[in-house]
Image (cartoon, rainbow, N blue to C red):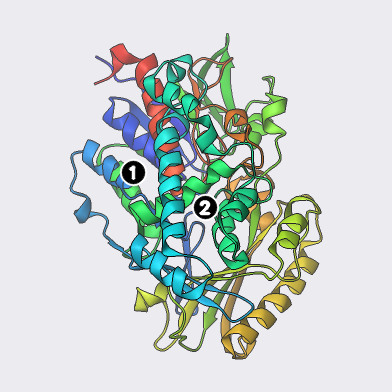
Amino acid sequence: MERKKAIIIGSGIAGLATAIRLQNHGFDVHVYEINDTPGGKLTEFYKSGYRFDCGPSLFTMPQFVEELFQISGKEISEYFKYIKKEKICTYFYEDGTRFTAFADRERFAKTAANIFEVSEEKILKYFKKSKKKYDLTSSLFLEKSLHRLSTYLSKDTLKAIGSVRALDINKTLHQLNEDEFEDPRVVQLFDRFATYNGSSPFKTPGIMSMIPHLEQHYGTFFPRGGMYSITKSLFQLAIEIGVDFHFKTKVDEILVDQKKAKGILVNNTIFEADIVVSNMDIVPTYKTLLTHQKAPEKVIKQPRSSSALLFYWGIKREFPELDLHNIFFSKNYQREFDAIFNKKGVSEDPTVYINITSKNEPRDAPAKCENWFVMINVPGNEGQDWDSIIKKSRDNILKKLSRLLDDDIENLIESEEILDPRTIESNTQSYQGSLYGASSNTKYAAFLRHPNFSRKIENLYFCGGSVHPGGGIPLCLLSGKIVSELIQKDYKSNMV
């Protein structure tokens, strides 16, 4: 039987996962990528003897990567290695408090009880509730399409509906955390998990308190070779099983005939296919590739998630007090989130995220130096004066870090690169430079995300952080799984 042909537009993590799955399902897969390397947001660069990861900085739920090697009949250790971290993150507060979040939940709770005004029992109870929310909803919200009736005709769905009160969807994450904890430092600690999907704890629903479970139960990991090794290993796997890649290739249009996707147009050349999957952000997919089709305006006009302003600094000194992941909290973080989501600006006292891969990979920086990935959350690109914002933010970040680390940080910077929402948007085709597509700032957000398939155009599917189930490495990998399973059902007779 002749193999069906699938075209995937974009080679982000979701595009790579979809390509691997469809190739294993018997499709002849071709991936078209506008850039000269795979990975989308998850890439790397070198400068002045330093190596930097771009994009996601935290790796969790490695089972979704492992699964791609398993279904391909390959031994993952030959392509990809990672270690489980004992320490998840070190938190720095303006009042001088420092807290190390350990991966072991009992040790986490004990350390928290020694530092904050909270009992071990309270912390462990919170984690237990977090697990319950995840267990009730993961099969519905994360592992299946929310837009197919079959998803709702299951025992898991009925169980989740029967336990809706336990999901805390009618209060914000901040309200939930204030109800749970008296110490404002603990509230802020658990509020920050809203940033995992680019939202505000003062707007996103309390169900998002399930996110800490992902760190405490599944753990956090460091990929050998840095985060970009995830991209490299999946790309190598895809090549070996027969996926065909076309780099530096701009897709001009998704071709549709009689409400069926028929292929793509590239530089006036038609490439036909039985299946077309867009790993491109859903907004530019409609605005640039489906210009002759009616766009779902309500869906694509949803408010976007936060973006990021990143400074990649080569630091000519080692800081023993810093770990791989570090967070320097804002003193008034409600004002910070209001600035991002209400005023479309940046707080003068932002929360600063620093990741230092040279802690685990010394070759990522020269001897006795460190590579700092310094990030603050900012709004998406809506025409702000970013040059002014960058200058002011840089000054504020340096003042904050110099004060809390008791050193002149600016004097230690010997290499610098900057990434802002404009360049994120232009480099990755992410609308407004948002990191996670639409924000999750309402309890209906999950249902309003664009589905992984087109309701009006047959043979057209979507994967990646801008569609269901959302952004971040685990969810992007899951979107690839959801898409491949939808295609498998739609083309069951043609699958291997």
The percent position of residue 150, horizontal first and vertical second, equals 43, 15
Left or right of 125: which side holds 173?
Answer: right
- Image-based side of 372 in relation to 484, left or right: right
Which numbered disc covers residue 64? Answer: 1
Q: Is residue 38 above or below residue 19?
A: below
Which residue occupies the foreground of this view, 137 or 166? Answer: 166
Query: Can residue 482 be seen in this snapshot?
Result: yes
Q: Tell whether label 2 touches label 1 (CB within 8 Å).
A: no
Q: Earlier in the sequence, mark 1 or mark 2?
A: 2
- The x, y position of residue 484, in whole percent, is 38, 28
Please provide percent x and percent y for residue 38: 44, 49
Residue at numbered disc 2: 41
Residue located at (63% from left, 31% from top): 444
Q: Quadrant of the N terminus?
A: top left
**Residue 340 x/y as whole percent:** 73, 55
* Residue at 66 percent of width and 33 percent of height: 288
Q: Nearer the viewer, residue 85 or 280?
A: 85
Specify few, some or many for label 1: CA neighbours under 10 Å numbering under 14, 14-19, or 20 or more.
some
Would residue 372 be found to the left or right of residue 344 on screen? left
- Disc 2 residue crowd, few under 14, some 14–19, many 20+, Cα 10 Å: many
Residue 208 or residue 234, whichever sits in front: 208
Q: Secondary structure at mark 2?
A: loop
Query: In 3D space, how far apart are the residues under numbered discs 1 and 2 (Cα atoms)?
Result: 18 Å
Quarter residue 205 falls in: top right
What residue is shown at x 51% (from left), y 61% (from top)? 54
Label 2 sits on what residue type? Lys
Note whether residue 51 is visible: no
Three-letter amino acid code of the residue under disc 1: Phe
